[in-house]
Structures are given as C-alpha cells and as structure tokens.
C-alpha cells in the first residue's frame, strides 16, 4: 500500500513499527507505561476485531505512542470512507488519539500530518484519565497497563464497542464466569456493560520493550444485561463489597460489608434473603444473582450514599 520508509505523507496501513519508533527519536520507556507493539501481524489483526456492525465513523485510540496502531486505524478509516464515497448523508470517518507523552503526541502530528490536514486525525495531548473524551463511536487501543482498569471503566459506561489490549491476567478476570477462580468484581462489573471476550493472546515478544507478562486483546460488545437494577452505582458498590469477602458465605459477606456497600441494616437483608443463596459464596453467584440480591438489599437494607 505504501513505502513504509517515507514517513509523513505516506498512505496508511503498513508503516514499519521499528521505523516509526526510530523516526520518533525517543525510546519507549516502560516507566511511562510505554511498550510498543512491533509485530505487524498482530497490528494488522487488531482493527478487524471490532464487531462487524460497529459504527466506525469516529474511532478513538488511547496511547498512540509512535503510531504503529494509529497507522492501521487510519487505514481502516480511509477504507471506510472509500466504501462510502458519494454517500452525502454520511460524515467522513475520523480518528482521535489521546497520548499523554508530549514527545509522542508531537511526533504523531508530524508523522501523520497529511491525515491531520485532511481532517482524518486529531491528536489530543493529555491524560486519558481526565481529558474530555471526544464523541467516539468505537475505541481500539493498546492500553497503558498501569491505568488500564481506570481507562476501561471510563470507557465501558459509554456503551460503545471496544477492542482493548490488557495484561492477560486482567483480561482473564474480565471474561471469567461464576465459579471460576478468576471470577470477581472485575468480571461482574465489566460484564454489566458488555459482552466481553478474549479474541487474541499476545506474547511478550510482540512488544518492544517487552512487558513482564503476556497480553490479551479483549473485545467488549455493548449490550443490556439480562437483569435489571434500579440503582447502578449501588449495584456496583454492593458487588465490590461482597467480593472483599469472597471466601465467606454470602450471609457473612453481606453482614460484614455494610460499611462498604452503604447498607445501614445488613441484618435485614440477611433476614429477607433465601437460605440457599446465603449459604453460597460470592464467587459462585452469577451476575443476575448479584443483581437480585442487590435489589433485595436496596429494599430491606436501608442503603445510604457512601
Ligand atoms: C502500551 S503503549 C502503546 C503504544 C502504541 N499504541 C502501540 O501499540 O505501540 C501505551 C501508550 O500510552 C501512553 N500513555 C501512558 N499513560 C497514559 C495516560 N494516562 N493517558 C494517555 N496515554 C498514556 C504511553 O505514553 C504510550 O504511548
């Protein structure tokens, strides 16, 4: 598609990751959560993990680094725009990239100057934890692992498709089901917002510098959960509270964690709940059982704001 050595002005999709890092003139620094993807095959596959029906008209990338994934995402944007040429109703697609490191943010603007000039790309220099998020339709990112949980839980409530690289152990906790050892607060909270699945495991060798652990790409497809909760914030707090006592019975977990869940009368919840449920352990309750218990707790336990 392009001569990957040419840099600024080249078409998109096959820039060489090592050449990009060289042109950026600054080495990735693991102390700043910088582990750049250097495996072309992984880079090429990642954008294609978006669900088929995803609205890709405004992609968001968090942590652009030297731009290897940015390049692939721009190729996806250009391909989408090409497919829709002549469709006057549709706005042209675009990509926004948030990057905290000023050196790499400047490099991305320079390397992809044509895309910036063409209105395909904007680079937002800032911390993904507190910048205003642009109005994206889907997010694809190789996240900074030090803050991947905080970023994921900033993105998930937006209800948009996400394709995100995490540490493998974190990804396994996100997708785990009740009864599995990796199942916990993270699983219930993530699955509250989306169907989550690991779509690829990525070895350390795919990065430079290599992280200490294996990685995994997770696809989050937004959907309504198969239960209803009247107060989402309370539900998530209640789940968090019970998983602080994952080895206790549900009965003792409810009793012991009123200060975390904000229940003034946890004993009243225990009195109202089914005996079979109370004998189980939090790690064995599926999300809908948590939701039913949370609703019972709201009704009987006098919850207050925490
Ligand atoms: C794992 S690297 C990924 C780089 C590039 N996308 C790739 O795949 O090669 C994470 C990137 O996120 C940036 N970063 C770290 N913390 C950040 C934060 N809080 N907000 C935005 N970007 C951050 C780092 O500077 C780094 O460029």
Image (cartoon, helix red, strand yellow):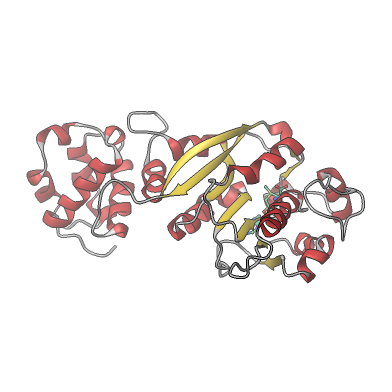
Q: Residue at x 31, y 36 (%)?
A: 246
Locate residue 120 relative to residue 17 in the image: left or right.
Answer: left
Q: Is residue 45 visible?
A: yes
Q: Is residue 18 above or below residue 126?
A: above
Determine whether, in the image, residue 238 is placed left or right of residue 166: left
Q: Is residue 302 left or right of residue 179?
A: left
What is the x, y in percent for residue 294?
22, 50
Q: Is residue 137 left or right of residue 74?
A: left
Q: Position of residue 177 (x, y in %)?
A: 37, 33
Residue placed furthest toward the front: 86
**Vertical position of residue 252 compared to residue 301: above or below:** above
- Which quadrant would residue 277 be assigned to in this image? top left
Q: How many marks?
A: 0
Residue at x 33%, y 52% (from the top left corner): 236
Position of residue 189 measured from the top left corner of the image (x, y, whole percent): 38, 48
Quadrant of res 212:
top right
Viewer can see residue 143: no
Q: Nearer the viewer, residue 87 or 258?
A: 87
Q: Nearer the viewer, residue 160 or 77?
A: 77
Q: Nearer the viewer, residue 111 or 255?
A: 111
Q: Where's residue 70, x and y in %?
A: 72, 54
Rendered residue at 17%/56% (across/down): 298
- The extreme left residue here reads 271
For the C terminus, which image quadrant?
bottom left
Q: Residue at x 84, y 53 (%)?
A: 26
| Residue, far top | 180
Q: Tell me which corner region of the image, top left, top right, bottom left or bottom right, holds residue 248.
A: top left
């Amino acid at each position: 598609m392009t001569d990957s050595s040419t840099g600024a002005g080249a078409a998109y999709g096959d820039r060489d990751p090592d050449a990009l890092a060289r042109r950026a003139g600054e080495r990735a620094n693991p102390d700043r959560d910088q582990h750049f993807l250097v495996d072309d095959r992984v880079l090429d596959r990642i954008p294609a993990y978006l669900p088929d029906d995803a609205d890709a008209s405004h992609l968001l990338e968090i942590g652009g680094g030297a731009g290897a994934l940015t390049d692939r995402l721009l190729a996806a944007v250009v391909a989408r725009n090409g497919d829709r040429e002549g469709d006057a109703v549709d706005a042209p697609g675009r990509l926004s990239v948030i990057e905290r490191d000023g050196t790499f943010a400047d490099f991305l603007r320079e390397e992809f100057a044509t895309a910036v000039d063409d209105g395909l790309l904007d680079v937002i220099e800032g911390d993904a934890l507190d910048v205003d998020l642009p109005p994206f339709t889907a997010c694809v990112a190789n996240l900074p692992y030090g803050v991947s949980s905080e970023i994921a839980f900033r993105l998930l409530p937006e209800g948009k498709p996400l394709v995100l690289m995490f540490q493998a152990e974190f990804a396994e906790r996100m997708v785990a089901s009740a009864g599995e050892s990796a199942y916990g607060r993270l699983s219930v909270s993530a699955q509250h917002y989306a169907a989550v699945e690991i779509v690829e495991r990525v070895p350390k060798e795919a990065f430079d510098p290599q992280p200490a652990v294996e990685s995994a790409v997770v696809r989050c497809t937004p959907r309504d959960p198969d239960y209803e909760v009247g107060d989402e914030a309370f539900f998530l707090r209640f789940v968090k509270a019970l998983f602080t006592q994952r080895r206790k019975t549900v009965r003792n977990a409810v009793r012991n964690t009123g200060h975390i869940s904000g229940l003034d009368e946890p004993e009243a919840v225990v009195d109202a709940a089914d005996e079979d449920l109370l004998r189980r352990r939090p790690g064995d309750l599926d999300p809908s059982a948590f939701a039913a218990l949370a609703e019972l707790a709201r009704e009987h336990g006098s919850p207050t704001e925490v």
